[in-house]
Image (tube, rainbow, N blue to C red):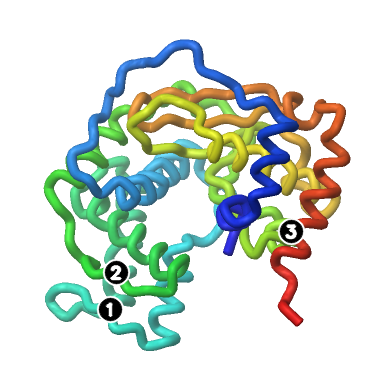
């Protein structure tokens, strides 16, 4: 369970966010610069999350980064002796070690190899193990179209939009506030801006996207007394990876709302009830 599942399960939460915080609209639609090459949309989305993370790690040496979710997937698979195989009878641990080596080589050289791109596809599959508890069927496989897709997404990254930050947090969590919703981790924090990555075809702010940004903003606020790295953001935003566009809006649209404090209290109470053990 997570912030995403909480918002998906709790209709009242969705309605209250929609009624309280007006969802921004986008005035212009930029061209799609990275067209999908396969129908593996979710796989590509998670794999690109890792690729952008790696790019930022190289751009900002010493970046604060949480452990990969993929490592938790590997640990789960090994703990329960999950029936998951890799071609050529390579163990899951050995596969992860190969990916880690390709990742380090990229940090050292800046050369994005097909080996690393294929590795990010498997990192996405390890993520799936952790989040679903189920084994993927295609671990170790990399379709040519997926490799092409990931490379064009990498080439579309607007470098200047992401450069110049004094603080970069990758895959940050929200301390005890994350545990409030049984797990919540954002994609990226640049200075005091929270950014969620969307590798989607349509350049639009869907209701689910906005609700998630509102949820992250509340969790950060709840965590601000506990974690120095968390405070009220000045902006929240979405990076539309297929368009190469970083969209941001003032977080005052959330924190400055006259009913924000009331909503925050309700959100915390509802999450505690939702995830409390059944008696």
2 and 1 marks in contact (CB < 8 Å): yes
For the residues bearing labels 3 and 2, Cβ distance under 8 angstroms? no
Q: In the rendering, at what x and y percent does residue 200 appear? A: 37, 35
Alpha-carbon span between mark 2 and mark 1 = 7 Å
For the residue carrying disc 3, how many other residues have a C-alpha within 10 Å: few (<14), some (14-19), or many (20+)?
some
- In this rendered view, identify the residue nearer to me: 236 or 189: 236
Quadrant housing residue 274: bottom right
**Mark 2 falls on what kind of element?**
loop
Location of mark 3 (residue): 271
The x and y percentages for residue 60 are: 51, 39
Count of marks overlaid on the render: 3
Sequence-wise, the earlier of marks 2 and 1 is 1
Q: Is residue 138 left or right of residue 181?
A: left
Of circles 3 and 2, the one toward us is: 3
Q: Is residue 70 above or below residue 134?
A: above
Mark 1 neighbour density, 10 Å: few (under 14) some (14–19) many (20 or more): some
- Kindly identify which residue carries mark 1: 84
Please tell me which of labels 1 and 3 falls first in the chain.
Answer: 1
Label 2, residues with CA under 10 Å away: few <14, some 14-19, many ≥20: some
Q: Nearer the viewer, mark 1 or mark 3?
A: 3
Q: Look at 55% across and 25% down and name the residue there.
A: 164
Q: CA distance from mark 1 to mark 3?
A: 34 Å
Give the residue drawn at x 40%, y 49%.
50
Q: Secondary structure at mark 3?
A: helix
The residue tagged 2 is: 136
Q: Where is residue 245 shown, x and y percent of the image?
A: 43, 23
């Amino acid at each position: 369970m997570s912030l995403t599942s909480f918002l998906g399960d709790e209709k009242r939460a969705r309605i209250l966010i929609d009624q309280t915080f007006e969802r921004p609209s986008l005035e212009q639609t930029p061209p799609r610069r990275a067209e999908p090459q396969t129908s593996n949309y979710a796989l590509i989305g998670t794999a690109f999350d890792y690729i952008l993370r790696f790019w930022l790690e190289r751009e900002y040496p010493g970046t604060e980064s949480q452990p990969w979710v993929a490592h938790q997937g590997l640990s789960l698979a090994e703990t329960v002796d999950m029936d998951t195989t890799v071609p050529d009878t390579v163990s899951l641990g050995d596969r992860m070690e190969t990916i880690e080596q390709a990742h380090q080589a990229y940090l050292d050289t800046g050369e994005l190899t097909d080996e690393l791109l294929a590795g990010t596809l498997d990192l996405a599959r390890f993520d799936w193990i952790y989040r679903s508890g189920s084994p993927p069927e295609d671990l170790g496989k990399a379709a040519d179209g997926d490799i092409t897709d990931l490379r064009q997404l990498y080439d579309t990254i607007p470098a200047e939009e992401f450069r110049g930050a004094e603080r970069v947090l990758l895959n940050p969590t929200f301390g005890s506030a994350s545990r409030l919703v049984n797990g919540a981790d954002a994609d990226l924090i640049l200075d005091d801006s929270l950014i969620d990555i969307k590798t989607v075809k349509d350049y639009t702010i869907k209701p689910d996207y906005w609700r998630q940004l509102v949820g992250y903003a509340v969790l950060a606020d709840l965590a601000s007394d506990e974690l120095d790295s968390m405070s009220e953001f000045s902006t929240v935003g979405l990076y539309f990876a297929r368009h190469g566009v970083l969209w941001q809006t003032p977080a005052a649209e959330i924190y400055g709302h006259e009913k924000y404090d009331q909503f925050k209290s309700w959100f915390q109470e509802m999450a505690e009830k939702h995830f409390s053990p059944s008696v």
